[in-house]
Amino acid sequence: MSAHGSSSQSLVVWHDVECGAYQADLALWVELAKATDDPVLDIGAGTGRVALTLAATGCRVVALDREPVLLDALAQRAADAGLAVECVVADAADYDIESTTFGLIIVPMQTIQLLDSEARAAFLACAHRALRAGGLLALAVADTIEAFEPDEVLLPDPDRLERDGWSYESQPLSARRIGDCVRLERLRQAVSPSGERLEELDEIDLADISPAHLRAEGERAGFVPQPSWRVPPTPEHVGSEVVMLRA
Ligand SMILES: C[S@@+](CC[C@H](N)C(=O)[O-])C[C@H]1O[C@@H](n2cnc3c(N)ncnc32)[C@H](O)[C@@H]1O
């Protein structure tokens, strides 16, 4: 099978193209995880960019995602690296891992902005139940989500990946405000080893919420807001504020 040969493989590859190379936040998650002896829950863990980094430092990590194929890839990578990561297929807005009490729950890379307000409220209630008293919930919120049209601006650089002779490129095309979301449109292009080109359009909606808004939602769920931490911007990515909520 080619690297691009099935929809499940394709989900893993595009996840790696668009998330895999980001490193600016890793030191922050490692520092937070070192401060607890209890297990850490990584929400929206994907193929394990953060979960595998934490497991490599000796941290006990549970990786939660709603996409089984992404967690299959994560589990394979953990096994290849000799790391232990427990994987849980579940929706962030509806999970209950009764067997474990967590000292830290992390939500990296703006995953919280993939949830609408109802789902965020449900997620915050689940997270409050899953944390030990005094445990910490840390959620990364993008500093800005600027709307743009292709003819208005120099487009952001695409994310790129070479794998198994294939070249992948994901080019942001536009970001449009729709209600309380920003809809990001990306052109995904894959070129096979023989030069065949495949293209698809992808759209995601990101909730345009401020850290203050998220802190207020956290307080309504019973959390006590703490001072935020920061992930600085890089040439390729906006910075983020990491909202800290104590259970
Ligand atoms: C932007 S990616 C971040 C992946 C990874 N945490 C990282 O930082 O590289 C968002 C991830 O959240 C997952 N996701 C989105 N909505 C979800 C939901 N409602 N419940 C669980 N996972 C979700 C997606 O499948 C995807 O793996």
Image (tube, rainbow, N blue to C red):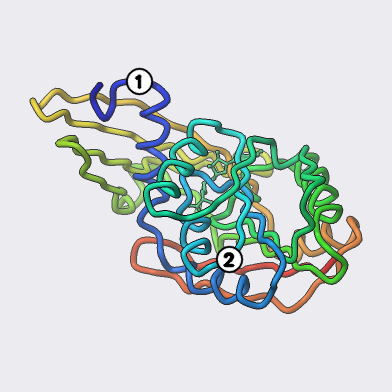
Residue contact at pointers 1 and 2, CB within 8 angstroms: no
Answer left or right for 25 relative to 210.
Answer: left
* Percent of width and height locating residue 75: 48, 42
Quadrant of the drawing holding the C terminus: bottom right
* Percent of width and height locating residue 51: 53, 56
Element type at mark 2: loop
Q: Which mark is residue 35?
A: none
Instruction: Kindly give the residue lying farthest to the front in the view shown.
Output: 82
Q: Quadrant of residue 181?
A: top right
* Percent of width and height locating residue 102: 75, 60
Q: Which mark is residue 59?
A: 2
Answer left or right for 171 relative to 37.
Answer: left
Instruction: Kindly give the residue lying farthest to the left in the view shown.
Output: 194
Element type at mark 1: loop
Q: CA distance from mark 1 to mark 2?
A: 33 Å
Residue at point 62%, 73% (across, down): 32
Which residue is tagged 1? Answer: 6
Classed neighbour count for the residue bearing mark 2: other residues with Cα under 10 Å, few (<14), some (14–19), many (≥20): many
Q: Nearer the viewer, residue 120 or 210?
A: 120
Answer left or right for 36 relative to 238.
Answer: right
Residue at point 50%, 69% (across, down): 57
The amino acid sitting under disc 1 is Ser
- Nearer-N-terminus badge (1/2): 1
Residue at point 34%, 26% (across, down): 200
The answer to whether residue 191 is above or below residue 62 is above
The amino acid sitting under disc 2 is Cys
Pair 1/2: label in front = 2
* Percent of width and height locating residue 74: 47, 44
The quadrant where ligand 1 appears is top right
